[in-house]
Amino acid sequence: MERTNSATMTRHRWTILATTALAVTATMTGAFLLGKEPSTLTQRTPAPDVSMTVKPPLQLPPVKWKLSWQDGFEGRGKPSSLWVPLSGGGGWGHKALQYYTSEHARLNGSGALVITAAKQRNGEQCWYGSCQYISGRVQTDGTFSQRYGRFAARIKLPVGQGIWPAFWLKTPNAGTIHSDTYGEIDIAEIIGGKPRLLQAFEHAGNHRFAASMLLDHSLDSKYHTYGVDVTPSSITWWLDGKPYAQLEKYPGWPYDKPLFIILNVQVGGTWPGNPNASTRFPTRMSVDWVKVYRIADPA
């Protein structure tokens, strides 16, 4: 969810490359044979082997998982004590326009946590003056974190120009994004103005990773299960159980530490841009469940 200049980001994309060697026929005309008149010699070179180089499909880590934590969002009103709501309108590092309030992250009575972003004044002051938008953010910092694991959630994401929903992880007491202790894994983000483009990121002190996946439908049209597998050697992003990006461990990575969970909807700011006349409010991020698995002990 934190952002720096995109020019410094290392972008990794999953590409299948195929190369085929073609048989070649060469004709030599006017070749001179010793002691004889010139004649025509046709020489056919042997056809080289046809080779196909295909990058193997990305695989989920070969790990057995055991459920360690979950929330199915039963009930109505404020979420359970597992979740800590945040409040404020200081821009959140992106010149965001919303003021976060606990009233905009509520259980709907039908088994979902709903984070609502609205164009609405609430009498609070934001960094730019009187707040024009309200939204919600909840996280498990101080209530739950886990070292390594499978982190997953079933979510219907909102879209629209200037809308930035996110499901992400951070290391506790991480400091600023440029510090050596900082670690962030963005499991699922979209810039609402690009409603079919799922994006994933990793941010550490001196390292950036980005990946994306273009779907054939808008992400607000149905629920998807978004997940990431964090192991001692890699981070693998997946959608509905199918992996689409992977980052191998690099020197100095901060992901041998516990990670906590964040859910939020940002409005406006330097990365998604601000809402315009096409943006519909209120807009909602509906979370059916969140589950965390740990690496199972060997049998």
Image (tube, grey):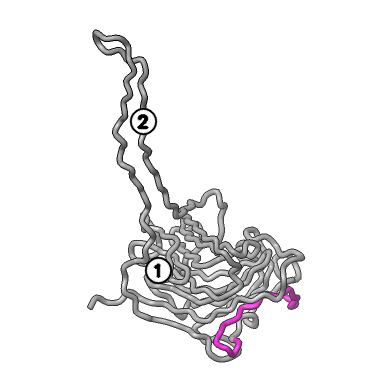
Give me the disc on residue 204: none
Confirm whether the magenta stretch covers residue 120. Answer: yes
71 or 102, which lies in front? 71
Q: Is residue 260 left or right of residue 114?
A: left
Q: Quadrant of the C terminus?
A: bottom left
10 Å crowding of disc 2: few (<14), some (14-19), many (20+): few
For image coordinates 55% across by 74% down, the residue present is: 263
Look at the numbered disc 2 and give the secondary structure of its residue: loop
Residue 111 is covered by the magenta coloring: yes
The vertical placement of 94 against 21, above or below, is below
The residue singled out by tag 2 in the image is: 25
Image point (53%, 81%), residue name: 288
Nearer to us in this view, 43 or 123: 43
Label 2 and label 1: CA atoms lie apart by 51 Å
Q: Is residue 44 above or below residue 189?
A: above
Which residues, given as a range, are shown in magenta? Answer: 108-125
Q: Position of residue 113 (x, y in %)?
A: 57, 82
Badge number at residue 229 = 1
- Is 269 on the left or on the right of 186, as rendered? right
Could you tell me which residue is drawn at 48 percent across and 51 percent down? 10
Q: Are marks 2 and 1 in contact (CB under 8 Å)?
A: no
